[in-house]
Image: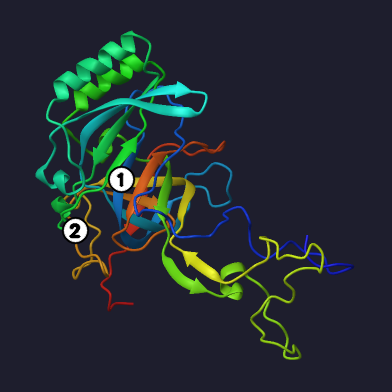
Amino acid sequence: MGGSGRNKRPRRGSLGYSPRKRASKIVPTLNSWPEVDDVKILDFPGYKVGMSHILRIDDRKYTLTKGKEMVVPVTLVETPPVYVCGVRAYKKTPYGLKTVTESWAEGPKELSRSKTVTKSPEKDLARIQSLIEGGKVDDLRAIVCTQPKLINLKKKPEVMESGIGGADVNAKLEYLKGVFGKELKVKDVLDEGEFVDVISVTKGKGFQGVVKRWGVKVQTRKSNDARRHVGSIGPWHPPKVMWTVPFAGQMGFHTRTELNKRIFRITHPKDLNVTPKEGFKNYGLITSDYAMLKGSVGGSTKRILRLRKSVRVPVRRTGGVPDITYLYKASAGEA
């Protein structure tokens, strides 16, 4: 608690995300996966397009607006097909998962910009099969690469590791053999009306002061020093500045997870065109499959996002595909 006497209040800013430093890489790394029975990949990457709004019929059970039309902001994420370019085997140890071996497919030619792959996938898969039979493999993960060239975004793909649902390692291997070296579309992984967690790197704000970075109160006009500083950096003893004291520093460009974003639509522009005539600002036209998510998500335009199946499904979840009655598609110059 901050303050003393009558002026007690919670501290300014949360310590739950310390240290507030820049993300190590632009592609988010996932460390936890939902426990599901379906044996398939548990997340799908996409690129942030922008925002719009829709009118839909409220299908929530316990609201005063049930059955009525309501305005909802939405985020559009373009999701071109991904390529399953590898399989990685893990062994559980007292110190966590340890990589045993992996197998790589040749993949698209742009993959060489990110990774140098081996040329013997059949032998590697057979080796993984023998290791599973010997009890030396406890988990399998898929290695997928994006294909941004399909939407004319850039050439170099992002390579990432995705978890596989189910508990049986043999079933996971059979599934991976079926998709190994092939393309997967977003509808093969996610469904309309489903809840997903969105993991992304937020917009970078650079070096910011304590008022913007931590929410410290601006001091009054009678303060002797600068007004946009902390009032005190701590007591005399202990004779050091604690790490909990707000200071200026990096703000933004952090890896963050937003839980339970509902997917309103997964479709193609030929079936439901949402692009304005001149295209989305700083992005352009949507030419591939895209997902329409409720609300806003972190990250700037064109930044890669990862849509993971929800790890904490809401208790009062609303299933099914929502009924959309109107889709806003005005040009930038229109009101």
Q: Residue, x 51% and y 38% (percent of image)?
A: 317
> Looking at the picture, does residue 115 appear above or below residue 226?
above
Q: How many marks?
A: 2
Q: Is residue 149 left or right of residue 136?
A: left
Q: Which residue is mark 1?
A: 45
Q: Is residue 23 left or right of residue 186?
A: right
Q: Please name whichever residue, 212 or 262, is drawn nearer the observer in this view of the structure.
A: 212
Q: Please name whichever residue, 248 or 180, is drawn nearer the observer in this view of the structure.
A: 248
Identify the element where label 1 is drawn: strand
Q: Which residue is mark 2?
A: 153
Q: Look at label 1 and name its amino acid.
A: Pro
Q: How is the image coloured?
A: rainbow
Quadrant (top left/top right/bottom left/bottom right) for the C terminus = bottom left
Residue furthest right as drawn: 5
- Residue 172 placement: quadrant: top left
Residue 331 showing in the rendered view: yes
Q: Look at label 2 and name its amino acid.
A: Leu
Mark 2 → mark 1, Cα distance in angstroms: 14 Å
Pointer 1 local density, CA inside 10 Å: few below 14, some 14–19, many at least 20:
many
List x then y, in percent, for residue 320. 40, 37
> Which label belongs to residue 211?
none
- Residue 222 placement: quadrant: bottom right
> Looking at the picture, does residue 281 appear above or below residue 292?
below
Q: Residue, x 41% and y 64% (percent of image)?
A: 203
List x then y, in percent, for residue 152. 14, 57
